[in-house]
Image (cartoon, coloured by chain):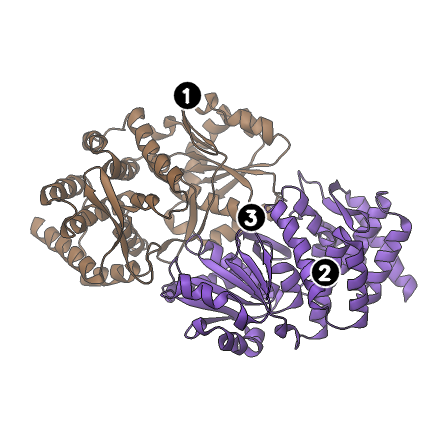
Chain colours: A purple, B brown
Amino acid sequence: MQIIETNNYQIEFGPLAESGLNDLLKEYYSERIKLILVDENTHENCLFYLLESVSELHGAEIIQLPSGEENKTLEVSANVWEAFSEYLISRGDILINLGGGVISDIGGFIASCYKRGIDFVNIPTTLLAMVDASVGGKTGVNLGPYKNQVGSFAFPKGIYMDTVYLDTLPEIEIYNGYAEMLKHGLIADKELFDSILNAANSGELPDDEMIIESIKIKQQIVEEDPYEQGARKKLNFGHTIGHAIEGHFLHKMKISHGHAVALGMAMEAFLSFKEELLSKDDFEYVANSLLAIYELPVFSDDDIHEMIELLNNDKKNESGKIMCSLLDSLGSCAYNIEISEQKFLDTFMHFKNLNLSLN
Amino acid sequence: MQIIETNNYQIEFGPLAESGLNDLLKEYYSERIKLILVDENTHENCLFYLLESVSELHGAEIIQLPSGEENKTLEVSANVWEAFSEYLISRGDILINLGGGVISDIGGFIASCYKRGIDFVNIPTTLLAMVDASVGGKTGVNLGPYKNQVGSFAFPKGIYMDTVYLDTLPEIEIYNGYAEMLKHGLIADKELFDSILNAANSGELPDDEMIIESIKIKQQIVEEDPYEQGARKKLNFGHTIGHAIEGHFLHKMKISHGHAVALGMAMEAFLSFKEELLSKDDFEYVANSLLAIYELPVFSDDDIHEMIELLNNDKKNESGKIMCSLLDSLGSCAYNIEISEQKFLDTFMHFKNLNLSLN
């Protein structure tokens, strides 16, 4: 069992049966109601193993949500809050979020607002959720095309990661996770970026150490600045454009979060170069590496127009100005950089033309 | 201008034009969007005076909600979040909650969850909101009959109280406020209770000092225990039964919050006596004083059955047990007292019969 210490809780990495989860439940929640939040995928593929590994969860109530980012909504949250009320869930009870980023995002939000907050733990079942969503205390739901527009900062009582869940993940999910791992390398550790890039190119699962290093980068940044007043903004590299791509395509062709962020990183590396923070060589290395793995879609002029609209309502904007976190070298990230609408337009056009020239 | 200092912000009591609100807005929000949340009543009766008193609010966006506890819902919150998105509200902007308890409850909730939290201030326009809802950081919306079932702890940047707003309040609203003031007396200061009772019986507005003393009692308890782990539970005296009454009658005859809490205090004083915490004389003094001002409605057996159902889902319950805060003398309150369903039933029956015997 590998333990990543944080200020307020533990992140444990290893088999669930050997983790501290059973003891936590026994010590603090033995007479409480335990609820497990799943979607149809984790209900089918992940729940049995959890129950087999953690005896204190026998008899837990199971709440199943429809899977997918398009169901990370207020309406679904309201249904769960109503179910909680029917189950007579009270403040001392605990919610176990078993799933990918959608489950930990919406589950954390549901827990943090029900009766002004009940406890929860995260058991991420995807690579993306392990290296990103389950860690850091950001919870939320989407509001139309706006990603995580409504949410809270709420920290779990513990995070338990068991890579057995990664063995049956579809390939797209593995690449989803790689995107955030590559980001952690790009903003903090060039060598890690290179080795994650190698692993991603091989198409195989990353080894444990690589995952743990990636989590540590995120965790350290979050601990330094939990409420995103400053340094935590580095973690938003690739996400200003990435969220616009993801939000815009949510109800169309559906570009996954990792895919959208990878494209966002390629484009924000372009912005980093245009802002004279990053050399042309470094930009090209980043963009070419990412686009070799993550396909660049064809953007229509309408797509670009609508993504610019979304950028104008990005959560990170200040006084109506669109703000970016940009690379100032490979392994280092600057933040609070104002970027004009025109520069985003130039960026989208650059990649639109790049795509045309490639095809 | 009277200032009540707290750990993180100021409560100011006096004319808005002389308050620190204008300076706060000038210093931290001059380039930000200012939003004012009103309902149709405060739009008509309170907004002009605010704009006249605080020049920094000229040009502020006005968002109007339908008034009333029955509109303190997730659906209304969702509409406001959508409006915020349309206005391109970003994290550094600020919401001004201008209204009674419904506005500060839902406005605080809306602000605390939009993009994971924007700043807000409260300008309470009712006596109840001044002495209770606007202070203490509890925000929330109702879920069906469950009061504040979904919400957060979120503290405003400042609270600005101007008693000019009380001059035109309907009588029912004055009594609404008196109920919580009487509670503050009952749980912490018997002499204050007696003088508030005198004032309430006179039918006139309480004087400023009485209001300020009441706020200080609440504020000190909140500061000691902001997240209601212990001592803050004293403030729930009268509210276990009070919320059940209010929730049950929400869509029927509509008993106001203060009225419901006053009835709840009379009944929980009965429980305090039955639990041998309070003498019979003291119970009768409390109950008779309250019922002389706040009319006891006729409860049907169905009403009682449904209120017991609501009690079983009270936010304060622990492991399915209904918990009460009860008086252990006049001016002192105990908490974490488990009360069986049967005892609540006995209490409701006692007051049902009392009502029959009175009529």
Image spot of residue B101 (x, y percent): 38, 41
Q: Which mark is residue B80?
A: none
Answer yes or no: is residue B100 visible: no
The local crowd at label 2, few if under 14, some if 14 to 19, many if 20 or more residues have their Cα within 10 Å, is: many
Q: Nearer the viewer, mark 3 or mark 2?
A: 2
Mark 1–mark 3 distance (CA, rounded to whole Å) = 32 Å
A154 sits to left or right of A173:
left
Q: Which mark is residue B1?
A: 1
Q: Secondary structure at mark 2?
A: helix
Q: Which mark is residue B114?
A: 3
Residue in view at x 68 percent, y 54 percent: A217
B292 sits to left or right of B212:
left
Chain under callout 2: A
A20 sits to left or right of B230:
right
Query: Which residue is disc 2 drawn over?
Result: A181
Residue in view at x 10 percent, y 51 percent: B354
